[in-house]
DNA sequence: CCACAGTGTGTAATCGGTTTCATCCAACGA
DNA sequence: TCGTTGGATGAAACCGATTACACACTGTGG
């Protein structure tokens, strides 16, 4: 195979076109400043040699990487797929690659050791952090690229945040359920150390208070882990409670769907016996039975905004510290009037 | 801010340690070949200066990129999230980054123009193609990095393939349904130009034949697009058929769940009136009511195998052309004995 | 006729590492 | 004592682009 020949470099093009390498480079990056005739000659030579630019060389010279790193808590979670899709869309328009890293992929080693080497200007031009449980010290070191937090956030990390209005969603949920007459509402939360959980709970409690309900005690919430499995397991815990709630607000849709499945399997009717609400509006929310009432957040948009915010930071601007994206209520069949107590 | 100082380079470390840059480089990449004393001195100097390696420079010299590109047909589709997770896991162990690109992100431009610049050795060290509908000519050009096809495949593209046993899954589905006594089985397929669709249908037809059923006519299949929405829409099309099938085999779980939802909403009972099967075993298959009988494929494993196959190719080996991963039947509540015909 | 501005181009330094090759030195056997 | 071997190290070439700077040339105004 004579395929093994070296790929053409800029010098090969220059020789063929009868110009210097500088002129070829200029033709590529700023065609306007070379003369018509020269440009034609260079383009002809590029076509003949089959030349393609070596981006590593360009990046070295220009002190950049040409890519942005997304730190995802769990790549396998479909929730992040849509966010990544939004990020990818914006990055591509700016000729930046999307690098993806799963922060939980190495279970036994501390995140610090594994992740630290990647938080470096020679690895990426910017970082979007989607994991709210990382150590802020990880990012507080010289050489760390510009940072943006999205979706979740890290206490004590000053980087800009692009978030859904989690508290607002909690309030909407409380308003919806209390509006249907529910007075004993269980809250199935996410992990307690999650920033999402805290914000949604705070908004939910505020919403209950605004509806004139007394502050619920500790027995009015169950702690989950955002999985459908734990939602199903929560059904049994719920049924064992001394007084049964007439409605449940779940911190995400997976748990809500798991819970509904568990409740219906146990013989309850949704929403006649008990109402169930979720949060996120994943696609399946529209395809379970009954359809899941939930709080919609626009994940692709959140990804886009995060990417745009990061680009602003990379350009040296200082965008607003926190960007909050609206959420709204999507009413489906899983919630209904409270049964007569 | 005196933060604006240049990050330390290898020369700074060398000076401080009183050695040459070559020695520092060797200490970093192959500590065994420098003497104990020198190594200590260099490590000390690295710690003092806070030096970190510039990977762009290393990559330029070593003629590599340090990353692998995954071409995904639709990043927002959770199906690919798990595959990417598997890919990511293997790549990380080999100190390679994962670059992700959505092949459909630019709707109006031809994939050729958009994608071609990325299929270059200066952009990635290898490519995993997850999109079966790309033009093979895209990859048949000088400078294209080593290639592996995963999950879907492209006719006429010689690169190694890592696939689930789609035909085998189709056979399993046919065997399961015919074993339950079903004789009139509808097949809700994916898009007709998808390699997945063709393989699953071929296996399904073979399974029917093996069960002694006559070859079904064109009226025995409906064509879908892998979305839950089209599954739900298919319910109406099914109910309008002159003779109603007693079972439906869907080419993926989303369509199956959508179909079940539509059928149940229309008053049918699953599985008493009609059995429904899916393909993939997505997480929700276990959390719908009834639970969805389906064909399980191990997506994370498929991602891992694809990455491993690519690494072998990158190392100059020529791995087997097609690696087929086992699938198996997961029986849940959505399928049951055929109603008396 | 000369100074000067403006345009287009070439030369060479530069980005920050890796790696080849040469050199030095100590240990060893003849 | 001397050549040989092998291990550790340094000097400099190299990866392939970008870009600061110099320079040549043209046209203009004084």
Image: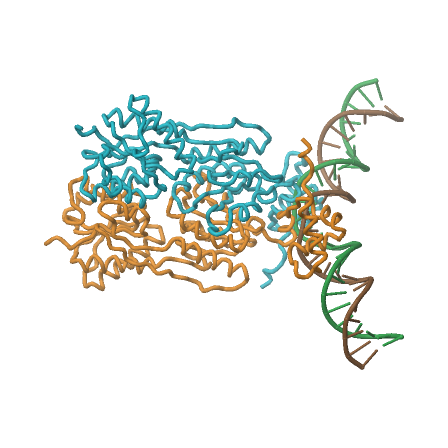
Chain colours: A cyan, B orange, C brown, D green
Residue pictured at 59% horizontal, 43% vertical? A120
Image quadrant containing the N terminus of chain A: bottom right
**Nearer to me, B134 or A57:** A57
Residue pictured at 19% horizontal, 45% vertical? B238
**Nearer to me, A183 or B220:** A183
Q: What is the x, y in percent for residue C20?
A: 72, 61
Image quadrant containing the C terminus of chain A: top left
Q: Is residue B166 left or right of residue B7?
A: left
Q: What is the x, y in percent for residue A17?
A: 68, 46
Q: Is residue B88 visible?
A: no
**Nearer to me, B316 or A240:** A240
Q: Is residue A171 left or right of residue A334?
A: right
Q: Is residue A335 visible?
A: yes
Q: What is the x, y in percent for residue A318?
A: 56, 28
**Nearer to me, B51 or A214:** A214
Number of numbered discs visible in the structure rendering: 0
Q: What is the x, y in percent for residue A99?
A: 51, 44
């Amino acid at each position: 195979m004579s395929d093994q020949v070296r790929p053409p470099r800029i010098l090969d093009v220059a020789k063929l076109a009868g110009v210097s390498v500088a002129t070829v480079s200029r033709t590529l990056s700023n065609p306007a400043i070379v003369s018509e005739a020269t440009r034609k000659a260079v383009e002809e030579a590029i076509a003949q040699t089959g030349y393609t630019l070596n981006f590593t060389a360009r990046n070295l010279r220009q002190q950049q990487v040409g890519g942005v790193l997304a730190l995802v808590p769990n790549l396998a979670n479909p929730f992040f797929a849509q966010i990544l899709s939004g990020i990818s869309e914006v990055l591509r328009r700016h000729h930046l690659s999307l690098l993806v890293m799963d922060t939980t992929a190495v279970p036994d080693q501390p995140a610090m050791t594994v992740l630290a080497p990647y938080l470096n200007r020679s690895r990426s031009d910017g970082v979007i952090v989607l994991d709210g449980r990382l150590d802020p010290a990880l990012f507080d070191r010289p050489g760390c690229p510009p940072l943006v937090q999205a979706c979740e956030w890290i206490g004590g990390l000053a980087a800009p945040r692009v978030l859904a209005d989690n508290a607002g969603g909690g309030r909407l949920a409380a308003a919806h359920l209390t509006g249907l007459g529910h007075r004993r509402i269980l809250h199935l939360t996410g992990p307690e150390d999650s920033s999402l959980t805290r914000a949604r709970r705070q908004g939910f409690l505020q919403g209950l208070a605004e509806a004139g309900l007394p502050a619920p005690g500790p027995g009015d919430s169950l702690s989950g882990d955002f999985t459908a499995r734990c939602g199903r397991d929560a059904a049994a815990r719920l049924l064992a409670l001394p007084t049964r709630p007439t409605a449940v607000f779940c911190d995400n849709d997976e748990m809500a769907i798991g819970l509904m499945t568990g409740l219906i399997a146990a013989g309850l009717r949704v929403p006649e016996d008990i109402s169930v609400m979720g949060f996120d509006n994943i696609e399946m929310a529209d395809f379970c039975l009954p359809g899941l009432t939930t709080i919609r957040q626009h994940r692709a948009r959140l990804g886009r905004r995060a990417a745009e915010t990061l680009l602003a930071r990379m350009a040296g601007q200082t965008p607003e510290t926190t960007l909050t994206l609206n959420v709204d209520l999507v009413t489906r069949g899983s919630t209904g009037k409270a049964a007569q107590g």
